[in-house]
Amino acid sequence: MATRLAKLSAIPDGHVEAFQADSKSIAVANVGGRLYAFDNVCTHLGCLLSDGPLGGNIVTCPCHSSQFDVTTGAVVAGPATTPVESYRVQVEGDEIVLFMSEDTPAAHRPSALAAVPLLSCLDAGSLAALEEFSFRRTFQPGELIVEEGHTGNGLYVVLSGRVEVVKGLGGERPQTAAILGPGEPFGEMALLGDWKRSASVRVVDEAECLGIDRWAFLAHLSKDPRLAIKLLQLLAQRLAETNARLAE
């Protein structure tokens, strides 16, 4: 369901504004000229996020300083522990259009993580607990999910569509290191530290991705050493694949 919210000029760069849509308070943030829509109500105690400051892509709740990534809805800092729902938004002419579907799947699907090789060692209870801290977002063809040289705070898993991992995007000789499809993760290194992304990830076909924040993942690492072993195996596999492609 599409809802026309306002003129583009209503949200200057670096600002967050609140709107009513489908009986909900929706916040829209302008980050460097790109718009992101998400639930305006903090998942901690219900304060309005649009009343808090926006720094880059991070909005801070004015009540207890919980922080959320406006591009995904993910929790960046507590006391909040549950992400806010994010929505697709686009500009048509000079109008901002929000897309909210009545049949949008629930934010947490029990089977989504079970198909991910990295998480296959977890039992149903552990998967359910991890899903409570995940978020979903749909990306359009050509959109950058991850940018090389920028820091990240978590892992993505492709649920549908395809994405490509590209080294040197924007340079003279960009190289495609991999094409990833449903069930395949990327951004694994961001689970272990606040390091810069080693490659960009660009959408090939419209893709829905599930994200898991670093802090939630690390909490599970301490509980299940098998997950740490899986992560090491996956990192080694990705390194070998990348080296082989670059050597061609």
Image: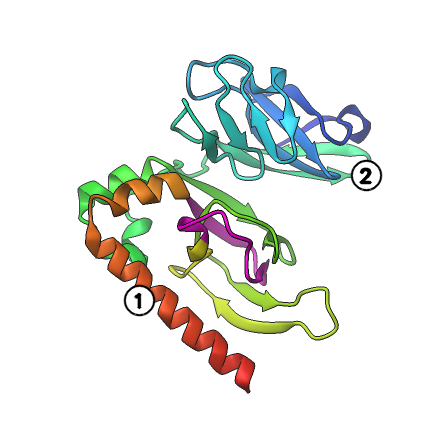
Task: Tell me residue 137's x, y (percent).
Answer: 51, 44
| Helix, strand or loop status at disc 2 | loop
The region drawn magenta spans 190-213
Which quadrant of the structure image shows residue 24? Answer: top right
SS type, badge 1: helix
What amino acid is at disc 1? Gln
Mark 1 to mark 2: distance in Å?
48 Å
In front: label 1 or label 2: 1
Q: How many labels, in total? A: 2
- Residue 184, x across and y down, in percent: 40, 61
Q: Residues within 10 Å of mark 2 (few under 14, many from 20)?
A: few
Q: Check if residue 239 falls in the magenta segment.
A: no
Q: Is residue 114 above or below residue 165?
A: above
The three-letter amino acid code for the residue at tag 2 is Gly
Can you give x and y, in whole percent of width and height, for residue 49 in the image? 56, 20
Quadrant holding the C terminus: bottom right
Q: Residue at x 51, y 27 (%)?
A: 67
Instruction: Tell me if residue 117 can be seen.
Output: no
Q: In the rendered image of this protein, does residue 208 appear above or below residue 83?
A: below
Q: Nearer the viewer, residue 202 or 222?
A: 222
Q: Which residue is mark 1?
A: 233
Left or right position of 82 against 119: right
Q: Is residue 4 above or below residue 169?
A: above
> What residue sits right under mark 2 in the picture?
93
152 and 116: which one is in front? 152
Asked whether the residues under the numbered discs 1 and 2 touch, taking CB atoms below 8 Å apart as contact, a structural biologist would say no
Quarter in which the N terminus is drawn: top right
N-terminal of the pair, mark 1 or mark 2, is 2
Q: How is the image coloured?
A: rainbow
